[in-house]
Image (cartoon, coloured by chain):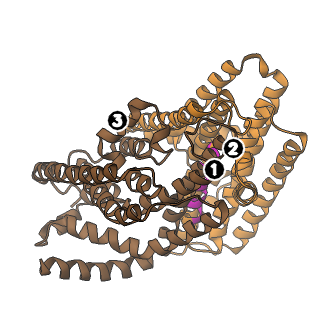
Amino acid sequence: MNLLRLLAVFVRVNVLGEVAYRVNFFIELFQSLLELGTALAGLAVVFNCTDSLAGWGPDEMLGLVGVYYLVGGIISLMIRPAMTDLIDAVRHGTLDFTLVKPADAQLLVSIRRINIWKVTDVVLGAGVLGTALLRLGTRVGWGHAALFVLMLACGAVIVYGFWLILASLSFWLVRMENILEIFQSMYEAGRWPVTLYPRWLRFAMTFIVPVAFAVTVPAQALTRHADARTLAGAALLAVGMAAASRLVWRLGLRHYSGASA
Amino acid sequence: MSYYVEYYLQQLKTVTAFMLQYRAALGIWMIGHVLEPLVYLIVWSAVATGGGRTGGFTPRTFAAYFIAAMLVNHITYTWIMWEHEYRVRDGTFSFALLRPVHPIHSDISDNLASKVVTFPIILFAAAVLAVIFHPDLHPPLWAVALFFPAAVMAFLLRFLVEWTVAQTAFWTTRTEAVNQMYFMLLLFLSGQIAPLELFPAPIRVLAAALPFRWMISFPVELLMGRLTPSAALAGLSIQAAWFGAVLLLLRVVWRAGIKIYSAVGA
C-alpha cells in the first residue's frame, strides 16, 4: 500500500513539473509517431519481398514491434530516468538526502523520476499490439494472453534488475553513463526476433544485454512460438535478477561514502 | 589556397588529439554504426534463405552490400545537426563567427579528424564481418577505381546537405523533430535499410530524384558491380550537379540564418 501511495505522489510531482512545458508533449508525440512510422515502413519493405521471416508472419512481426515499443516506452518512462538520476546522485553525493528518508531507498530511487511524456510510446506500443492481436484473430486464446502478461512482467523485472546493477556499479566506478548508452543501442536490435540472429549474437542479446527476454520472449508467448523451457527460464531469470540487483545495490550502499562536495 | 591547407592541417592535428580523449564516446558511436547494418544484413539474409523475392540477391551478396554500406555510411556520416543546434542555443557559435575563416571549414576538419581515429576500427569491424558472413564481392577494376571519387563526392554532398539542414537551428532551437524526419528519409532512400532495387518503382524513382541515393547507395552499387560504366559516369555527374545546387542553397540559407542569429544563451 505504501508503494502505491508513494508512486502516486511521485507521479503527481512529475506531472506538475512537466505540464508547464506542454509543447514538449506535441514534439514527443510527433517524434514517437515518426519513429513508429519508420519501424512499420521497414516491416513493409521486408514483407514486400517475403511472406514469412524465419517463421514470423507479418501480423506476428507487428505484434513484436508493438511489444518493442511498449517495453521501450516503460524503460524510458521510468527505468532510464531513475537510473540516470541515481548515477548523478551518487557522483554528487545528493543520495544522502534519499538515504535519510523513512522509506526503502531502493524503492525511492526507482520511482522518484518519471519522464511522463514517454507515456506516448507505451500507448502507441499498446495500440500496435492491439492491432496485431485483432489481425491474428482467434489464434490467440486467453491462456496465451495471461502468459504474455506474465512474460512482459518478467521482462520488465529483468531489464530493471539489469539497469539497477549497472547503475549501482557507479558506487565503485565513476563513468557509467557510457555503458547505459550501449544498452540503448543494443536494445534497437530487439526490434527483430532474436531467433533470427546467429548464435553468438543471440547469446549476447540474451545473457549480456537481456533484450531477448524483454521483447522476443513476450511476443513469442503471445504468438505460440515459445516452448516451456524458454518461459520457465525467463521466470527463473526474473527472480534471480531481482535478488541479484538487490544484493549489488546493498553492497554498493555499504561502499557509499556520502557527499563528495 | 595554401592558407587553407595550413588551416586544415593544424585543425586536423588539434582535433585528432582532442578526439582521442573521448575514446569511450567514439566507441559507442561505433557500436551503432556496426550493429545497424549487421541487423539488416541478418534480416535480409533470412529473407533470401527463406525463398523471398530478392531480385538475385543471395545471403552472400547481401553480406557484401551491407558491409559496403556500413563503410560508405561511416565515410559520409556527420553529427553537425546536433552540434550546430547545441552551439547556437548555447551561444558558443559566436566565437566561431569571430574567426577570419568560414565556420564550415572547421566543421569539415573536425569531421575528418574524428574519422582518422575511427576509420581503422570500422575497417577492422568490416574484416570481422567478412570472415563471419563470407561476402560475395567481385567488382570490375574500373568500378573499384571509380568507387573512390564516388565515395569522396558522397561525403562532400552529404556534408553540405546536413550542414544546410543544421541551419534550421537559427530559426528554432527545437530541431530534433526536423533531424528525425531527415534521418527517416535517409534511412530508406539512401539504401541503408535495403538495396534500392528491392523497393517498389515509385520509391526508387524518388530516391534517385532526390540527393539521397547519391549520398550512400551509389558508391555501394558501384562496388557491387551492379552499374554499367555509362551509368557510373552519369552518377558521378549527378553527384557533382547536386553538390553545386546544394552549395548555392547553403549560401542562401546561411546568409538568412546569420542575420537572425542572436546568440540565445550568451
Instruction: Say if labels 3 and 2 share a chain.
Output: yes
Task: Characterize the local packing of mark 3: few (<14), some (14-19) or many (20 or more) Cα atoms within 10 angstroms.
Answer: few
Q: Could you say where residue A45 lies in the image, as x and y percent from the top left?
A: 53, 35
Residue type at mark 2 is: Thr
Q: Secondary structure at mark 1?
A: helix
Residue at the (71%, 34%) spot, across then down? A56
Instruction: Say if labels 2 and 1 share a chain.
Output: yes
- Residue corresponding to mark 2: B49
Q: Earlier in the sequence, mark 1 or mark 3?
A: 1
Q: Earlier in the sequence, mark 3 or mark 2?
A: 2
Residue type at mark 3 is: Leu
Depth check: give the residue in front, A186 or A24: A186
Is residue A82 at least partly visible in the picture? no
Q: Colour of chain B?
A: brown
Residue A173 picture quarter: bottom right
Residue at the (69%, 43%) spot, across then down? B49
Between disc 3 and disc 2, the foreground one is: 2
